[in-house]
Image (tube, rainbow, N blue to C red):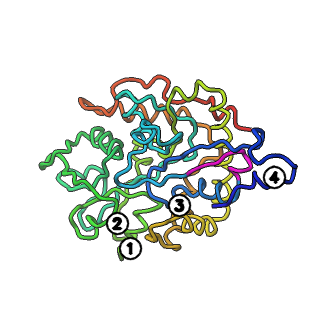
Amino acid sequence: MRTSILSAAALALGLSASAPALAADALTLQLKWVTQAQFAGYYVAAEKGYYEEAGLDVTIKPGGPDVAPTQVLAGGGADVVIDWMPSALAAREKGLPLVNIAQPFAKSGLMLTCRKETGIASPADFKGKTLGVWFSGNEYPFLSWMSKLGLKTDGGPEGVTVIKQGFNVDPLIQKQADCISTMTYNEYGQVLDAGLKPEDLVVFKYEEQGVSTLEDGLYVLEPALGDPAMVDKLARFVSASMKGWQYAKENPDEAAGIVLDNDTTGAQTEAHQTFMMTEIAKLLGDSPKLDTAAAETTVKVLMSGGSDPVITKQPEGAWTSKVTDAVK
């Protein structure tokens, strides 16, 4: 990460480094998952000094299998979190006042990837099959899709058998599942890296199945939006982050390197991060503003779960343009 230029600027002006006019506003961002190119725009914004230029001191906290962003936010461990809208709306209905303030990702990258040898050629062929699904809030789009297809998820010849998929592609490679959950920018590449070829696979993009839901939005707790100073800080954060995303989109190789520089696990590879960044660029919107029609579609998908919908009522106040309207 770049070191702060604010103190140097203050000294050059003959001012105290702690002068209020130059003090950077602290803000903590909780990621949805581990450090990877899925979040490249935020790391690029930090590395290139875009946050500093906006008067911000941003801390980026990686996620992981044991980290629930909404719980971190509720506990005061972050000011902003990245989450998928289905998870956020489900949490809101349960009482956590999450609000979407910006939506950098305009398209969904979620897919089911199946071995062609299983005989699956269309969703009608899912019946009686075993499907790998991520949980911890990521299962909601899948459950809505199965409900739309009229397929129960408790096994049996008239439904599907669901296995709780880890964040890897092992169930497909080891033939423990006929299909698994994949993202266009991550696990699908891992499947190819494991030796399977595109012609060995059949993929079903959620967007093409009419069950697309919004992913990777920025969320805060509703009370924060009542503070004009916080709204201003969030607007500066969103603006600088989008500048980071634009740079990452135009310079995928460099962005992948910046991600790797911030990965303390050493588990990532340059080739995969570059692949991820190239695919993620296809999902980014031109503006951080939420497409309310896409949000309403997400709500519709989540409420169409028959007797067991993900959410049961319209989520009033679940998104706002207050922050993006203030972006300069």
Q: What is the secondary structure assignment of the residue under circle 3?
A: helix
Give the residue at mark 1: 197
Give the number of marks. Answer: 4
Which quarter of the picture shows residue 235? top right
What amino acid is at disc 2?
Answer: Leu
**Magenta region: which residues?**
50-59
Give the residue at mark 4: 9
Provide residue 175's location: percent of width, then percent of height. 22, 68
The first of marks 3 and 4 along the sequence is 4
The first of marks 1 and 4 along the sequence is 4
Q: Residue 212 colored magenta?
A: no
Query: Is residue 205 found left or right of 277 in the rendered image?
Result: left
Provide residue 309's location: percent of width, then percent of height. 30, 32
Nearer to the camera, 203 or 298: 298
What amino acid is at disc 3?
Answer: Ala
Q: What is the secondary structure assignment of the residue under circle 2?
A: strand
The first of marks 2 and 4 along the sequence is 4
- Camera-side mark, 3 or 2: 3
Give the residue at mark 2: 201
Give me the residue at 43% from left, 35% from top. 74
Provide residue 295's location: percent of width, then percent of height. 49, 34
How many angstroms separate mark 1 from mark 2 (CA)? Answer: 7 Å
Give me the residue at 23% from left, 61% from top. 177
Which quarter of the picture shows residue 194? bottom left
Q: What is the secondary structure assignment of the residue under circle 1?
A: loop
What amino acid is at disc 1?
Answer: Lys
Give the residue at mark 3: 37
Q: Residue furthest left?
A: 156
How many angstroms separate mark 3 from mark 2 (CA)? Answer: 25 Å
Q: Are marks 3 and 1 in contact (CB under 8 Å)?
A: no
Q: Are marks 2 and 4 in contact (CB under 8 Å)?
A: no
